[in-house]
Each structure stands twice: as C-alpha cells, then as structure tokens.
Image (tube, rainbow, N blue to C red):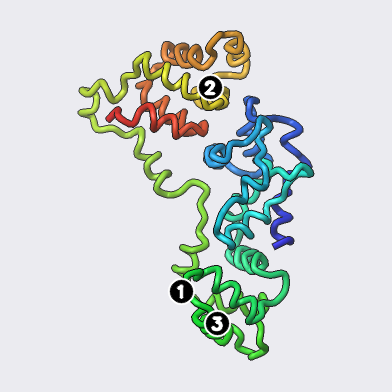
Amino acid sequence: MGVYASLFYKNEGQILTDLTDPSQFNWITAHAEACKLTVPEVQRCWSRFLMLQPDQKGNVSRAQFCSTANVFGQKLLEQIPCTEKDQITFQSYCNAVSWLSKSPLEAKLRGLYQILTSGTISKEQLRSLMHNLYPREGPQTTDELATLFLNEVDKSNRGYIDEDQFLAWVKTLPQQTLMSVLHFPIIPSNITHLKEQEPSFPSTAVHFKDRSHLCDRQLLQVATEMSSKRRDWRLLANSLGFLEKDCSRLEHEHSEILALLQIWQKMSQEAPLPVLQTALRQSGNADICNEVFSLNF
C-alpha cells in the first residue's frame, strides 16, 4: 500500500506538530485546513484519537496505536507513517482517515490488496490468510478454502493471484455489498441524523424546564471531570464561542474551566443544557457529556 500510504504525508509542507499542539486554540482548525477536512470531521477524529491517550503534543506511540489482535487490522494500521520517535501524529491519523473515507472505490481496492502483499498471492499465502480469517478451522478446511478461492479468482490458471485479477474478481461482487463494506464515513450517518434532530424539540417541551435547565452542580461536575481527565478546555471554549483572548484571561483563574462555564452560562441567551451538551461532543468530550447528563431526560 506504499503508493497510497504516501498520501498520508500530504500536508502542503506543513508539519503541524511544529506549529501547534492540543492546548492551542487552532488545534482543530489547523488540522481541518491542512488535511482538507471540515471542522466537524476533525472534531470527530480528535474525539476518537483521544481514546488512545495522546501526549501533550498530540502524538500516540505506534505500539499503542497498533495494538489489535486482528491481523488484517494490524497491517492496515501499520501503513500510517510515524515520526523518527516511532509516534503517530494526529495529522497523519486525519490524513489516513480522510483517504479511507474519500478515495475512489478502485483506489481503496488496490490499497487493500497491497496491504495483503507487495506482489502476487500464492496458494500458501492464501492458506495463511484463511487461517487468520477463520482461526477456529483446521488445516484441511483452510486449505480447501484457499484452493476454492484461488480457482475462483485465477482465471488464467497461473497458480497465483495478481492485483488486476483481484480487482476484476471483486468487481463481480454485488455493488451494494461492495459499497457497504468499503463505506467509511468520518461522521457516521446515525450520528449525523441525531445531530440534525437534536435542536428540534416539540412545542410542549417548553413546559419541562429540566430539559434546558443547567444547575451549578452540573457545571462543577463537568469542570471536575475535564480537569481530572486532563482535557483541553480551550477546545470546549472554542465550541462555546469564546475567543483566544478570552481564554488567555481565564488562564489566571484558579479553576479556569469552572470560570469559563460560569461566564458562558451568564451570557447564554439560548437554552444552556443542549448547547453545552453539543459543545462537549464537538470538543471531544462526549464521554463526559454522557456521564454528567445521562439522567437528564
């Protein structure tokens, strides 16, 4: 997959770890611009990347990033380039996700083939592949599967499969099945649907104050959780509409996160609860949002 993995480096000459880090106000927007993604797409990527517990520069060690028992998944993750210190940058991660999401079908198929091999696939390699796919099956079964697959794809009876043969065979599969398998949205459609539904409440909802009321205890809990989990409060501030100069002033507060939330609540002209919930999700703090507000129905 080398020719395709090289696209993960594309950044128009910008190495973002030299220009910004997760504590900076432009962390999300800089990656959106460099990786040709939308801000919501980068926010989604960052919320997933945070689960790997990146360091202060926003990097994750290759060993931690590639820790999966799935052999094929391991090979796929290994295609993402790393730094000289064997780390995966958030920028490389965004570029890889963008490629998986937006590349043409044929590019995806050729890239996936090259994950399996750099040349042709022999019957012995097929046996190994079938063993990885069906680890509970015995040698006889995996050998039969390898033979069956080779006969199905190798129409020239050469005893091996090359990239063009593989591509031609895959294209004989039902298009709907093929598209569903290779469909890789950065923001899943179910989340997009829920997002679109989120602001729309029935008119009777105005009678239920608990749907929009936000109490001091909840603000304190959000601030405490973000502090204990060492989350970047500037990203939340950005989602709530604060400017960088506002954040600079808040840095001198003893509890800048709580101060931020209290100031925002006083200035808020909308129902604060759904606004804060949305901002938490957009800033990569969906877990905190779910934990604090899970009982607020």
Label ID, residue 237: 2
Front residue of this view, candidates 135 and 267: 135
- Secondary structure, mark 3, is helix
Residue 198: x %, y % from top left: 36, 35
Q: Residues within 10 Å of mark 2 (few under 14, many from 20)?
A: many
Mark 3 is surrounded, within 10 Å at the Cα level, by few (under 14), some (14 to 19) or many (20 or more) other residues, namely some
How far apart are labels 3 and 1 at the CA level?
26 Å
- Return the disc, 1 or 2, that comes first in the chain's sequence: 1
- Residue in view at x 60 percent, y 73 percent: 128
> Quadrant of residue 251 in the image?
top right
How far from the left and from the top, in percent, is residue 135? 51, 69
* Residue identifier under label 3: 143
Q: Indicate which disc residue 174 carries.
A: 1
Mark 3 vs mark 2, CA separation in Å: 58 Å
Instruction: Point out the tag, 3 or 1, that comes first from the N-terminus.
Output: 3
The structure residue drawn at horizontal position 35% and vertical position 28%, both measured from the top left corner, is: 293
Q: Is residue 40 visible?
A: no
